[in-house]
């Protein structure tokens, strides 16, 4: 929260997101797509990741293909289903991307926390302080 209870900014929050934009294509990786890749990494399944995020398999598949096309390299290794079911895992490039994103997000959150605290402290000060 942005201030102590009763302050004029009490119910105001700072919101931000991290995304990757392509020079010509615009946004290619946003928080949802990073979450999708992270869920695939954790579950080993595109279907399980889609279910957890509440999207259709088709939408999740399309999102991954869209990102792969924009980046120019594969993010997933896929094996078809069968009696034992299929499997999906991140490629080395995909795992490296998610690892770097996780670190960036952690570092960014720590820095933003300090800046947000300072910002809201400044706007919550009495006018003549």
Image (spheres, rainbow, N blue to C red):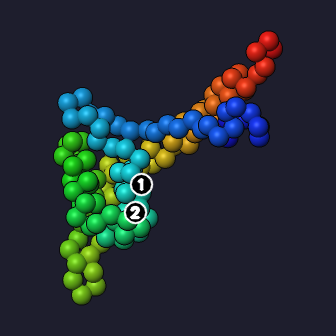
Left or right placement of residue 41 versus residue 57 in this view: right
Left or right placement of residue 35 versus residue 68 in this view: right
- Quickly name the residue at label 1: 35
State the residue at coordinates (41%, 54%): 35
Residue 70, image x and y in percent? 21, 42
State the residue at coordinates (68%, 28%): 120
Image-quadrant location for residue 83: bottom left
State the residue at coordinates (60%, 32%): 111
Image quadrant in which the N terminus is located: top right
Residue reaching furthest bottom? 83
Q: Is residue 28 above or below residue 88?
A: above
Say which element carries label 1. Answer: helix
Say which element carries label 2. Answer: helix
Residue 5, image x and y in percent? 77, 40
Answer few, some or many: residues within 10 Å of disc 1's Cα (few below 14, many 20 plus, some between 14 and 19): some
**Tag in front: 1 or 2:** 2
Mark closer to the chain start, 1 or 2: 1
Residue 17, image x and y in percent? 46, 39
Contact (Cβ within 8 Å) of mark 1 with mark 2: yes
Answer few, some or many: residues within 10 Å of disc 2's Cα (few below 14, many 20 plus, some between 14 and 19): some
Left or right placement of residue 72 versus residue 93 in this view: left
Image-quadrant location for residue 101: top left
Between the residue at mark 1 and the residue at mark 2, the CA separation in whole angstroms equals 8 Å
Residue reaching furthest right? 129
**Is residue 107 at all visible to an observer of this figure?**
no
Q: Nearer the viewer, residue 46 or 16?
A: 16
Q: Nearer the viewer, residue 128 or 103?
A: 128
Image quadrant in which the C terminus is located: top right
Left or right placement of residue 40 versus residue 127 in this view: left
Residue 44, image x and y in percent? 37, 68
Which numbered tag is attached to residue 53? 2
**Is residue 90 at all visible to an observer of this figure?**
yes
């Amino acid at each position: 929260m942005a201030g102590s209870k009763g302050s004029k900014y009490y119910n105001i929050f700072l919101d931000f997101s991290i995304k990757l934009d392509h020079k010509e294509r615009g946004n290619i990786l946003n928080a949802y797509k990073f979450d999708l890749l992270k869920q695939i990494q954790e579950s080993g399944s595109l279907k399980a990741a889609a279910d957890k995020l509440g999207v259709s398999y088709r939408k999740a598949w399309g999102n991954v293909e869209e990102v792969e096309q924009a980046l120019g390299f594969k993010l997933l290794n896929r094996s078809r289903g069968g009696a034992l079911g299929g499997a999906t895992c991140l490629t080395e490039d995909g795992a490296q991307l998610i690892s770097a994103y996780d670190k960036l997000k952690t570092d960014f959150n720590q820095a933003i926390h300090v800046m947000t605290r300072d910002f809201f402290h400044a706007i919550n000060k009495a006018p003549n302080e």
